């Protein structure tokens, strides 16, 4: 009698496991997001070199749900400018880092994008992400630091700062791909203009 019950339980467990695996395969995994640079441009403006850029930004369903439930997301925009040298390592000329914070206010039903002391509110997540994904006329270096006609190496990256997530979510971000947002860096060569713009 005991043998019969044990065999029934085993086959029932196998059936339940097969159904669970089958349903999870049908539903498919939630896709992790990604941040990819679409375009970037350096141009002179008065006595400064300014950066304009645009990113394709997709948080993925898990992070979109998290921010909509009140979990703050922090992003980091990193830019570096260097002068390649054939005889030594690249000469570092300028760098700029900007931190953004994206939150959702449940009472106001608005998304808020903050950087430094500046705050901007949006009625939808897509509008907040659209503003986050665009950089316009950001000063990155003085024109006087550049030699006209010389070639410089620029690098740009926008990424999710997982170290700023609340502690319980940091563990999930390490283990679960749905919490990871791939961020690609854009590297390009920039030739300093021959004449300064006044």
Image: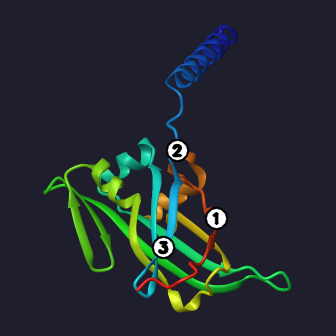
Q: Position of residue 63 (x, y in %)?
A: 42, 49
Looking at the image, which residue sits at the far front? 195
Residue denoted by label 3: 43
Comparing 111 with 196, the one in front is: 196
Q: How many other residues sit within 10 Å of disc 2, few (<14), some (14-19) or many (≥20)? A: some
Of tags 1 and 2, the one toward the viewer is 1
- Asked if 158 appears above or below 138 in the picture, the reply is above
Looking at the image, which residue sits at the far right? 87
Sequence-first tag of 1 and 2: 2
Sequence-first tag of 1 and 3: 3
Q: How many other residues sit within 10 Å of disc 3, few (<14), some (14-19) or many (≥20)? A: some
Residue denoted by label 1: 187
Of tags 1 and 3, the one toward the viewer is 3
Looking at the image, which residue sits at the far bottom? 144
Q: Element type at marker 1?
A: strand
- What's the CA distance linking mark 3 and mark 2? 34 Å
Residue denoted by label 2: 32
Sequence-first tag of 3 and 2: 2
Residue drawn at 59 percent across, 78 percent down: 192
Which circle marks residue 103 in the picture? Answer: none
Residue 47: quadrant of the picture: bottom left
Question: Which image quadrant: the N terminus?
Answer: top right
Residue drawn at 35 percent across, 46 percent down: 65
Q: Element type at marker 3?
A: strand
- Contact (CB < 8 A) between labels 1 and 2? no
Q: Position of residue 60 (x, y in %)?
A: 45, 44
């Amino acid at each position: 009698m005991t043998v019969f019950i044990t065999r029934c339980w085993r086959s029932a467990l196998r059936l339940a496991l097969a159904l669970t695996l089958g349903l999870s395969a049908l539903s498919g995994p939630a896709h992790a997001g990604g941040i990819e640079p679409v375009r970037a441009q350096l141009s002179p403006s008065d006595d400064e070199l300014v950066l304009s850029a645009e990113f394709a930004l997709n948080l993925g369903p898990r992070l979109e749900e998290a921010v909509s439930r009140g979990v703050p997301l922090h992003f980091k925009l990193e830019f570096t400018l260097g002068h390649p040298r054939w005889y030594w390592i690249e000469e570092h000329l300028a760098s700029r880092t900007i931190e953004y914070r994206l939150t959702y206010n449940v009472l106001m039903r608005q998304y808020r994008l903050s950087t430094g002391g500046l705050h901007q509110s949006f009625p939808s997540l897509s509008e907040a992400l659209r503003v986050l994904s665009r950089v316009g006329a950001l000063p990155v270096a003085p024109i006087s630091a550049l030699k006209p006609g010389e070639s410089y190496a620029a690098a740009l990256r926008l990424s999710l700062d997982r170290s700023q997530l609340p502690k319980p979510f940091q563990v999930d971000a390490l283990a679960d791909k749905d919490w990871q947002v791939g961020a690609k860096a854009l590297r390009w060569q920039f030739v300093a203009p021959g004449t300064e713009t006044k």
